[in-house]
Amino acid sequence: MNQKNAQYNLKDKIAIVTGSAGGIGKAIAANLAANGAAVVISDVQVEKGQKTAQELGGNAIFVPCDVSDCEQVWSLVSTTVDRLGRLDVMVNNAGINSSRPEDRVTFDRYPDETWRKMIDVDLNGTFYCCKAAAQVMLEQKSGSIINISSVAGVVALRLQIGFVAAKAAILKITEAMACELGPKGLRINAVSPGSTLTEGTRKLFYGESGSFQEQAERVVSFIPQGRPGEAEEIADAVTFLASDAASYINGHNIVVDGGWTCGFNRDF
Ligand SMILES: NC(=O)c1ccc[n+]([C@@H]2O[C@H](COP(=O)([O-])OP(=O)(O)OC[C@H]3O[C@@H](n4cnc5c(N)ncnc54)[C@H](O)[C@@H]3O)[C@@H](O)[C@H]2O)c1
């Protein structure tokens, strides 16, 4: 937990974070809990998710859910309301990408199966979660939904067409939902991480024996701040959006990328 993160009052708030067994989702859940929220850890990885909930202590429970299955999503939201009474914050963080060489190809050769999987988990999963959460929040006339997109949704990255499509669509549906639900007391925003340190990216990119270590060095050379982000730095933006400090922010996307996508970080 980042000691320097701002303190917000999320006391009595109930939050769900999808894909929070590890990585950025776990940092978000820990940050929300540290700011007073009761948090539902949710993930397809059951043992790891249970362990994370235990680590966070009394303010966290685990509810399993595959976000690409809309029945499981309804069950996640109804279980949360049954057990904790309401739903104030829905963080749609669960997501997949692929680093398999056969998936890192130009769009004309991009496997249909990878496209379908990416859309299913990253985009459909976000849609199902937003819809189920909104039903409860509309009754309450309040709630904050935060969708985790990516820099790939802001500027197109090569060789990741499924991921780019899903993450860009997440940003547009965030805006559409903000327009539709804003008048009814809900706020819907997005956070777009840049290259962020997690167990996964440490192993693949940033570790000493990472198979994409060269690529990681290239990526960092494009980032004005000259380093990857910490998961806690993404979590800080999410907690801010979840809190009343962001009470007039609706339909916005906070890009947390050290400046990677704000301009062309090269001299001519
Ligand atoms: N790490 C980065 O550099 C980075 C950059 C941009 C965007 N993001 C986004 O941030 C989010 C979290 O990424 P991360 O790096 O922590 O990834 P991660 O792989 O470390 O964690 C993702 C979690 O989601 C879970 N998950 C996968 N499929 C699921 C499903 N169908 N239903 C429920 N849970 C599922 C996984 O079990 C895992 O615990 C993702 O949406 C990702 O696209 C990450």
Image (cartoon, rainbow, N blue to C red):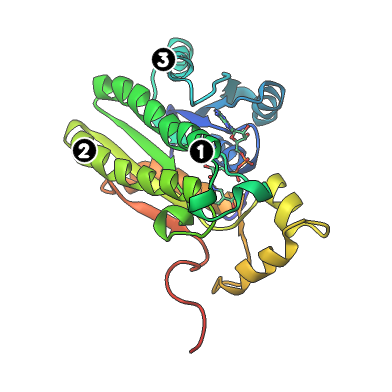
Residue that numbered label 1 is attached to: 112
Comparing labels 2 and 3, the label whose residue is closer to the camera: 2
Q: Secondary structure at mark 3?
A: loop
Work out whether mark 3 precedes mark 1 in sequence or the reverse, and give the earlier one.
Answer: 3
Relative side of 255 to 21, left or right: left
Q: Position of residue 207 (x, y in %)?
A: 78, 57
Please report whichever mark, 1 or 2, sits nearer to the chain's N-terminal start. 1
Disc 2 secondary structure class: helix
Asked whether 4 or 187 is in front, the reply is 187
Q: Secondary structure at mark 1?
A: helix
Task: Name the spot of residue 91 as percent of width and height, x first.
Answer: 45, 35
* Mark 1, other Cα within 10 Å: few <14 / some 14–19 / many ≥20: few
Q: Could you say which is closer to the camera, residue 226 or residue 89?
A: 226
Nearer to the camera, 169 or 183: 169
Q: Is residue 174 left or right of residue 41?
A: left
Query: Which residue is most to the right?
Result: 209
Name the disc covering residue 85, or none.
Answer: 3
Q: Is mark 3 within 8 Å of ligand 1?
A: no
